[in-house]
Image (cartoon, rainbow, N blue to C red):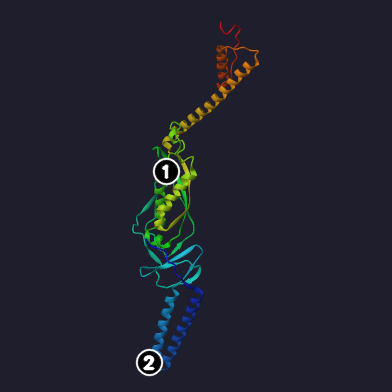
């Protein structure tokens, strides 16, 4: 595992003065040597001309060491294949001109990642890594993927991940392409987390009534996903700032069946509430009639009245009154 080391780069403004002086000195020496050679054919004139050529060449090489860094950027310095360090100083800087500017190419130029429901493939291979690495926060908005939850139900799920590079050495040297690595690991971790939890509680399974589900425990699921991503992306020097689910639904092939199931559960719950309220009202009515003492109801009349009240209170249509001109017993 690589570890980031801090490297220092000289001020670019100071080195710019050195480069300007080098150009002026080399040009002056060259003109002086040419004049000397024209007036005399001495050996000193030729040596001065050669020295001016060498000074000009050295100045051109030094001039190749300038680079700029904006806030949130870092430069990985590699000298002849050896990692020297990472420069994080902002502004105009100068470093060894022989530091590698392109840090290599991904080994698999044909690698690709499936993106989207239509199977569109995004080519991420064959990408040269520049020496400048962005350490700013980035957002990866993942596509919808189809996966089976803990109960085996096919669901569609998507996530958004906010991440950044915290160790440039690991990001550049320990993985082939850290951006495609983040995309692939995010999809893998999302599939794993989605398969650990059920989409929703099952009404007929009281043993898992308090279990974490994807629909009702968004915060817990997001935290589990972020911990999973942190663990897997640590080797690439990536820090996950936040991760949230952006889409969660049943797959189209079972969406209608699950919708009818939810509607049935809602109807049953509503009926249960109505019956509970009706029983309470009937019990209260019987008790109030008995407490007055003016009306004496036997058990059969109480049962009949309770039945009538339950029909009136629980029925969906309006009650139609029926007048009994006789007695209850004939």
Residue 269 image position (x, y, % from top left):
51, 29
> Image check: 152 left or right of 309?
left
**Which residue is drawn at the image coordinates 40% and 91% (left, top)?**
44
The residue under label 1 is: 194
Calculate the distance from the C-alpha at mark 2 to the C-alpha at mark 1: 82 Å
Nearer the observer, 284 or 192: 284
Residue 16 image position (x, y, % from top left):
49, 76
Q: Is residue 49 above or below residue 106?
A: below
How many numbered badges does the structure rendering display? 2
The tag earlier along the polypeptide, 2 or 1, is: 2
Q: Is residue 91 above or below residue 39?
A: above
Badge 1 element: helix
Residue 35 image position (x, y, % from top left):
44, 90
Q: Is residue 292 above or below residue 150?
A: above
Q: Quadrant of the C terminus?
A: top right
Residue 136 image position (x, y, % from top left):
49, 59
Q: Is residue 111 visible?
A: yes
The residue under label 2 is: 43
Q: Is residue 126 above or below residue 311?
A: below
Label 2 crowd bin: few (<14), some (14–19), many (20+), radius 10 Å: few
Disc ID at residue 327: none
**Which residue is drawn at the image coordinates 42% and 67% (left, top)?**
85
> Image check: 138 left or right of 102?
right
Quarter holding residue 317? top right
**Which residue is drawn at the image coordinates 45% and 50% (left, top)?**
226
Q: Are marks 2 and 1 in contact (CB under 8 Å)?
A: no
Badge 2 element: helix
């Amino acid at each position: 595992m690589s570890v980031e080391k801090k490297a220092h780069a000289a001020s670019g403004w100071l080195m710019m003065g050195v480069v300007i002086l080098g150009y002026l000195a080399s040009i002056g020496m060259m003109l002086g040597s040419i004049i000397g050679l024209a007036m005399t054919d001495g050996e000193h004139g030729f040596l001065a001309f050669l020295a001016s050529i060498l000074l000009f060449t050295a100045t051109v090489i030094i001039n190749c060491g300038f680079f700029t860094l904006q806030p949130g950027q870092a430069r990985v310095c590699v000298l002849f294949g050896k990692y020297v360090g990472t420069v994080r100083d902002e502004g105009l800087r100068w470093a060894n001109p022989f530091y590698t500017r392109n840090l290599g190419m991904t080994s698999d130029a044909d690698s690709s990642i499936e993106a989207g429901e239509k199977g569109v493939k995004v080519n991420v291979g064959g990408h040269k890594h520049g020496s400048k690495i962005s350490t700013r926060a980035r957002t990866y908005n993942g596509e919808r993927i189809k996966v089976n939850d803990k109960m085996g139900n096919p669901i569609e799920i998507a996530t958004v991940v906010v991440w950044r590079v915290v160790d440039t050495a690991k990001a550049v040297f320990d993985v082939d392409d850290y951006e495609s690595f983040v995309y692939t690991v995010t999809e893998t971790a999302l599939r794993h987390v989605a398969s650990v939890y059920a989409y929703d509680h099952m009404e007929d399974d009281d043993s898992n009534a308090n279990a974490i589900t994807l629909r009702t425990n968004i915060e817990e699921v997001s935290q589990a996903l972020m911990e999973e991503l942190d663990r897997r992306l640590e080797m690439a020097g990536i820090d996950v700032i936040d991760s949230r689910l952006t889409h969660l639904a049943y797959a189209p092939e079972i969406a209608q069946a699950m919708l009818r199931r939810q509607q049935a559960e809602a109807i049953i719950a509503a009926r249960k509430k109505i019956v509970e309220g009706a029983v309470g009202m009937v019990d209260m009515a019987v008790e109030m009639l008995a407490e007055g003492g003016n009306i004496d109801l036997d058990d059969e009349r109480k049962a009949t009245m309770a039945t009538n009240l339950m029909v009136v209170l629980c029925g969906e249509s309006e009650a139609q009154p029926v007048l009994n001109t006789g007695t209850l017993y004939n």
